[in-house]
Amino acid sequence: MKFEKIFAGQHKNEGYNALWNMVKDELPDESHTKIIRRRLQGEFADLCTDNYYIAYEDDVCYSRLWTGWGKHKDAIGNFGHFLTLPEKRGQGLGREVIKKWTADIKSRGDAPLALFCTATAEITEIYRPLGFREITPEAKGGFLYCPLGNSPETFKEFCDDYFVSGKEIYQKPASMEYRHELDCLLRFAFFALKEEFTMGGSFYVEDYFVKCPEKLSIFFDERNHVVGWGYEDNFKIHPAYRDCKIIKRY
């Protein structure tokens, strides 16, 4: 069995081919897996850091774990897509893949501020020793936060540091570079505030990146922190910024 790190846009070696064989037909109608395939093919490699940690043998990937974030200051990371094939479970492959991820994320100079993911209660117990914790008691293992570097221990403290109102916010065209700020941090913040985040019937903003990215926009504060999103003429702005002047930049 071989263990390897695969990054989006790299040359197509044996490990990459094994991972691609695993994901190329996976859940073909879901936005998340469609975007994962586009990431692996390097479509967003100039905008995003996407890394897989895999266990494979003879062109078959048996276990995988993914982490990704945008290439900008104060980035937010997404974590997950963790899977070990049933026939190889209980053999320690997943643990070895996690070890490879742990060593890498601790040594990086470009790591995001924090990692976010959604998980079942069972998977939450696997992630908890890695530093993940529920964002609120009501999350019940669903929305998880893992601080990195000097980020605060609690999600509330993280939000207090990240969302600091100013006088103006800036509306710009949406970019996959900031997808995790939307579907992870901002979604989780709205959940913690008991406010509705979604618009137009889709649960994830990522759905719109697949279907109609031209109708999307993102709102930034003066520090280039993501504070809201727009779909056509409908907006969802974090409450700390709802009295700010909106400046459009297209």
Image (spheres, helix red, strand yellow):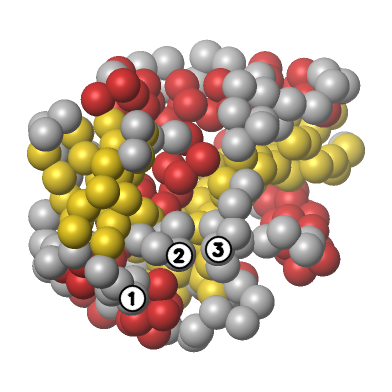
**Badge 1: residue crowd in 10 Å (few <14, some 14–19, many ≥20):** some
Tell me which label, 2 or 3, sits earlier in the chain.
3
Q: Nearer the viewer, residue 35 or 109?
A: 109
Would residue 95 be found to the left or right of residue 239 on screen? right
Q: Secondary structure at mark 2?
A: loop
* Residue receiving disc 2: 223
Q: Nearer the viewer, residue 179 or 204?
A: 179
Separation (CA) of disc 2 from disc 3: 9 Å
* Residue receiving disc 1: 164
Residue 185 visible in the shown view:
no
Q: Quadrant of the C terminus?
A: top left
Tell me which label, 2 or 1, sits earlier in the chain.
1
CB within 8 Å, label 2 to label 3: yes
Would residue 20 be found to the left or right of residue 79 on screen? right
Q: Amino acid at mark 3?
A: Asp
Q: Residue shown at 66%/32% (left/top)?
A: 46
Q: Secondary structure at mark 3?
A: loop
Q: Which mark is residue 128?
A: none
